[in-house]
Image (cartoon, rainbow, N blue to C red):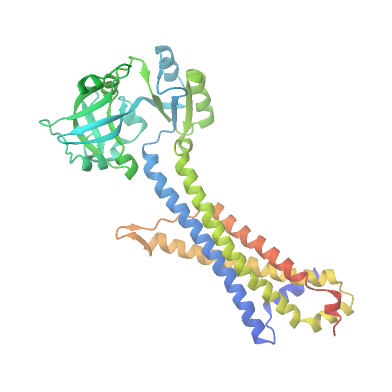
């Protein structure tokens, strides 16, 4: 058996004759345990918040989306449609036209993004899950489905046939505007439903049929702004992306869900990194206790170290004893801390101990990568702290007695 490891285990389990050293050691161990538990709980909390935030936007996010690489729109030919219909990895796709518009009702108005969708859109996105009340639109009529925020802003109900909505978009072209009537294209429509996704989308989007939006914008029959795709179960995303690109060419950019929400992902990841660094700094401070306890242990064991040195144990091996002791303390404390954190997270998931609102529990998610991040952080800091303490051992120190 490795002599240094054997003695390190003995020192770790045994108590010192000096109660002050025992107290310092216990404080150091508790600091490691609580630091590890706190780090894992916070990482799991942020993972839960990330999943909770993304689940709302992902409801209406397609698996893949093809957008115009230049300008706002592109033409989709009949030949390209036939090729898209034959793609093996694509289950459904929907042609989309999006544009900013003014929506007016009675004496109120607001700016929104009108999203014209075709009949396949409910197959790409499960629209039933987002409908708060009312129904989804009919493709063969001037019907709209508006967001909850827009509905509140305009004091808008559903199926009010006596008071239709008016949509306005500026007319393209050059020259002087002689009247407001000549400045805008306008269409009247009826709101038949209200959807609820998240605050941003609720305040921004209204859905319409693609023909209504096409008429409002004076688009050509084959002109669209994007195509949204739903892939078949088990389909390879990269392969599907390449197939779509080969059909549509360089006129489109194809994005997956992560790329569609890249700003949101960057914000969440930045916040997660910031919190990790803050708690790592707290752990670094906690590991000063580990360094202190090891140095106190070295001073307390000077007589034993002198004996070991006299019987032939090298200074390198003596340093290794306390290096291993500190490392073992960190690993054991890390495992205990992770175990306690896991219990806390499970209790939160089962019993909703912490609530954001009276009906919404704070979301937490247990992810293996967070377990590894916390464990390796503790291990690395423990190794560094043990190394700092163990290098204090010199030949003059052990030969004092």
How many numbered circles does the render carry?
A: 0
Residue 161, given in percent of the width and then of the height, sits at: 12, 30
Residue 375, given in percent of the width and then of the height, sits at: 60, 59
State which quarter of the image contains the N terminus. bottom right
- 51 over 14 or under it: above or below: above
Residue 12, given in percent of the width and then of the height, sits at: 69, 75
Residue at the left extreme?
162
The residue sitting at 70% across, 64% down in the picture is: 383
Does residue 250 show up?
A: yes
Residue in front for this viewpoint, 81 or 35: 35
Does residue 198 show up?
A: no
Q: In the displayed structure, does residue 172 sit left or right of residue 345?
A: left
- 16 over 368 or under it: above or below: below
Quadrant of residue 202 in the image? top left
Residue in front for this viewpoint, 400 or 245: 400
Q: In the displayed structure, does residue 378 sit left or right of residue 3?
A: left
The residue sitting at 74% across, 73% down in the picture is: 8
Quadrant of residue 139 in the image? top left
Residue 347, given in percent of the width and then of the height, sits at: 42, 64
The residue sitting at 17% across, 34% down in the picture is: 105
State which quarter of the image contains the C terminus. bottom right
């Amino acid at each position: 058996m490795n002599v240094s490891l054997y003695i390190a285990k003995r020192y770790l389990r045994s108590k010192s004759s000096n109660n002050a050293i025992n107290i310092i050691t216990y404080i150091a161990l508790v600091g490691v345990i609580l630091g590890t538990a706190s780090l894992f709980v916070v990482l799991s909390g942020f993972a839960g918040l990330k999943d909770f935030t993304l689940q709302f936007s992902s409801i209406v996010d397609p698996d893949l989306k093809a957008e115009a690489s230049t300008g706002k729109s592109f033409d989709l030919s009949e030949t390209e449609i036939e090729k898209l219909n034959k793609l093996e990895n694509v289950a459904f796709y929907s042609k989309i036209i999006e544009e900013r518009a003014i929506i007016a009702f009675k004496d109120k108005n607001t700016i929104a993004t009108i999203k014209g969708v075709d009949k396949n859109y409910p197959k790409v996105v499960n629209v039933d899950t987002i409908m708060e009340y009312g129904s989804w639109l009919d493709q063969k009529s001037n019907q709209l489905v508006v967001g909850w925020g827009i509905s509140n802003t305009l004091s808008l109900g559903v199926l009010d046939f006596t008071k239709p909505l008016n949509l306005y978009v500026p007319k393209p072209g050059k020259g002087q505007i002689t009247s407001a009537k000549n400045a805008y294209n306008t269409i009247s429509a009826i709101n038949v439903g209200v959807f609820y996704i998240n605050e941003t989308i609720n305040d921004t989007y209204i859905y319409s049929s693609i023909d209504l939006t096409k008429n409002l914008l004076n688009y050509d029959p084959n002109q669209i702004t994007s195509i949204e795709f739903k892939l078949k179960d088990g389909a390879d995303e990269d392969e599907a992306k390449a197939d779509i690109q080969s059909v549509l060419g360089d006129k489109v950019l194809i994005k997956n869900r992560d790329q569609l929400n890249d700003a949101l992902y960057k914000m969440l990841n930045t916040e997660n990194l910031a919190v990790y660094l803050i708690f790592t700094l707290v752990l670094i401070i906690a590991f000063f206790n580990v360094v202190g306890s090891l140095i106190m242990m070295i001073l307390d064991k000077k007589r034993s170290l002198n004996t070991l040195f006299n019987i032939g144990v090298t200074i390198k091996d003596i340093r290794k004893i306390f290096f291993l002791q500190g490392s073992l303390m960190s690993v054991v404390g890390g495992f205990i801390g992770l175990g306690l954190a896991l219990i806390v997270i499970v209790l939160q998931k089962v019993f909703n101990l912490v609530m954001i609102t009276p009906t919404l529990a704070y979301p937490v998610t247990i992810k293996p990568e967070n377990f590894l991040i916390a464990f390796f952080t503790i291990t690395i800091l423990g190794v560094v702290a043990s190394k700092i303490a163990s290098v204090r051992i010199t030949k003059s120190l052990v030969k004092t007695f």
